[in-house]
Amino acid sequence: MDANEIAAGRERWQQRYDKAHKRHADFTTLSGVEVEPLYGPPAGVDYPGFENIGWPGEFPFTRGLYPTGYRGRTWTIRQFAGFGNAVQTNERYKLILGAGGGGLSVAFDMPTLMGRDSDDARSLGEVGHCGVAIDSAADMDVLFDGIKLQDVTTSMTISGPAVPVFCMYLVAAERQGADLSKLDGTLQTDIFKEYIAQKEWLFDPEPHLRLIGDLMEYCAHHIPKYKPLSVSGYHIREAGATAAQELAYTLADGFGYVELGLSRGLDVNVFAPGLSFFFDAHIDFFEEIAKFRAARRIWARWMRDVYGATSEKAQWLRFHTQTAGVSLTAQQPVNNVVRTAVEALSAVLGGTNSLHTNALDETLALPTDESAEIALRTQQVLMEETGVVNVADPLGGSWYVEALTDKIEAEAEAIFQRIKERGTDGTITSGILRGIEDGWFTSAIADSAYTYQRALEEGDKRIVGVNCHTGTIAKDLEIMRVSHEVEREQVKLLQARRTDRDQATVDAALKKMIEVARTGANMVPAMLDACRAEATLGEICNALRDEWGTYREPARF
């Protein structure tokens, strides 16, 4: 790009910046030196390839979605939390919000993630252990008691039974008197990554995609601020994928959901802003920053050039980040504070829109109140003390970062081509479904995980406290344990609620839901009615299992 084009771009950025809202804050260094809101090439200098870097708030959005960077608004501190029953988790949410958290992120227990009730025989020993137990809308009432859902953004990390759980959330909001059209937050709903990495599915892909399409339509028409899909790379990376694989598989899944929306006749400029993303921030600092910057650029280009999005918001890739759980160690767990801080900083320098920082004890148990507070304070130290919020994309133009960004982008594009070639009709969706069916994704991730594990065992890759610097004077941590009484109490509560409800109304609502499932009508309204009647999650999901069957992963050797 020549100097005149660069100068014109800077002028466009300056005009946008001047019109944008800025926080009232001190934008100087610790020594009192004023810093500019943005840095770029020197005036009058040509910069070949600068069109791929660009300016914040302008296509291709490599440097961020907003001209102000974090000067306009800092990222949302969204700590992932959930354990035991709804009462206990509600207390943790109030602690997080009271300590400065900007939004909620709900972690569900394994029975809930699998669409099972707490008294299901397959739930034994798992209730409340890796998240909060939610059996019906009444549990949602308790979960958000004293928290106005209309005033707080709420993220829910669940995919298989995401739609009925979302309906329970809507019912809880209704009971609070909320205007549902004003609700804001994110539902994960990403079933592709379940088949690729996490394995928490209920049905074959087609009925899951039908439900997701219904949800996309419902939110686009009735709850425009709520994001019905958070396309997740986090679980793909945690399964052993490389940074490029995480990026490519995640964006490919996102393209699949765009194709789903288009197949429903939805306007890409209307529904695409309702798609968000969820990435892993791993320990390789610069690689992660490059990954985030490449993600925005790839998404913007594909949305414009492949799927015809003309509005900026439809081209934006907005993403939440969580620091890498898989990087945490049970050995010398206090070192995990350092790892989490470095990973969180990479997410911030990569322009994340919201962030969860893991607690130091998460390899051993659910976080204690103290470790959860340290994780929260890690973000606040970055935000308040380091100066990283003062300049938009401060590493933009770094030879190393730009070269890494280009390399990861090229690797991702090569993977997209391989996915398309696997399909039968030239769509990304067809290639994804074929890759799921024949195990291509899982095999590639397994190969990457094996390669990394060998490098660890041979000492080529090093982890402090694990295969180097193993001596320590640290004492064992006191960890949080979920009492078995939680399960007993939750089961008693669930059975009492079943006794107190109008069973005929429940039966009629479930019957109506299945009747709608046999048509082309949107299933969300009927599912909402079932949740209003206090049908349980297991009852809703089992009714759908009876209708659609269950998915079983093909055996592979």
Image: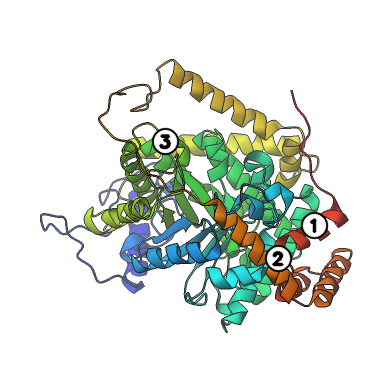
Q: Nearer the viewer, residue 60 or 335?
A: 335
Q: Earlier in the sequence, mark 1 or mark 3?
A: 3
Mark 2 surroundings: few (<14), some (14-19) or many (≥20) residues within 10 A: few
Q: Amino acid at mark 3?
A: Leu
Crowd around label 3: few <14 · some 14–19 · many ≥20 (10 Å): many
Question: Which residue, as the protein is rendered here, is positioned at the far left?
Answer: 31
| Cβ atoms at labels 1 and 3 below 8 Å apart | no
Q: Earlier in the sequence, mark 3 or mark 2?
A: 3
Query: Which residue carries the number 1 mark?
Result: 542
In this rendering, the label closer to the viewer, 1 or 3: 1
Q: Secondary structure at mark 3?
A: helix
Which callout, 3 or 2, points to the residue nearer the camera? 2
| Residue nearest the viewer, comparing 400 with 512 | 512
Q: CA distance from mark 3 to mark 2?
A: 56 Å
> Does residue 353 appear anywhere in the picture?
no
Please name which of the two marks, 2 or 1, marks the residue nearer to the observer. 2
Q: Secondary structure at mark 1?
A: helix
Place residue 15 in its image quadrant: bottom left
Q: Which residue is mark 2?
A: 495
Task: Identify the mark at residue 404; answer none if there is no mark.
Answer: 3
Please tell me which residue is depicted at 29% across the width and 48% down the height of the picture. Answer: 41
Quadrant (top left/top right/bottom left/bottom right) for the C terminus: top right
Please state the horizontal and vertical placement of residue 90, each as a whole percent of the image. 48, 66
Q: Residue 271's x, y, as percent?
A: 64, 65
The disc labelled 2 sits on which kind of residue? Gln
Q: Is residue 319 above or below residue 20?
A: above
State the image quarter where residue 56 is shown.
Answer: bottom left
The spot of residue 406 in percent (x, y) is 46, 38
Picture residue at 11% right of the left edge, 58% below the top: 32
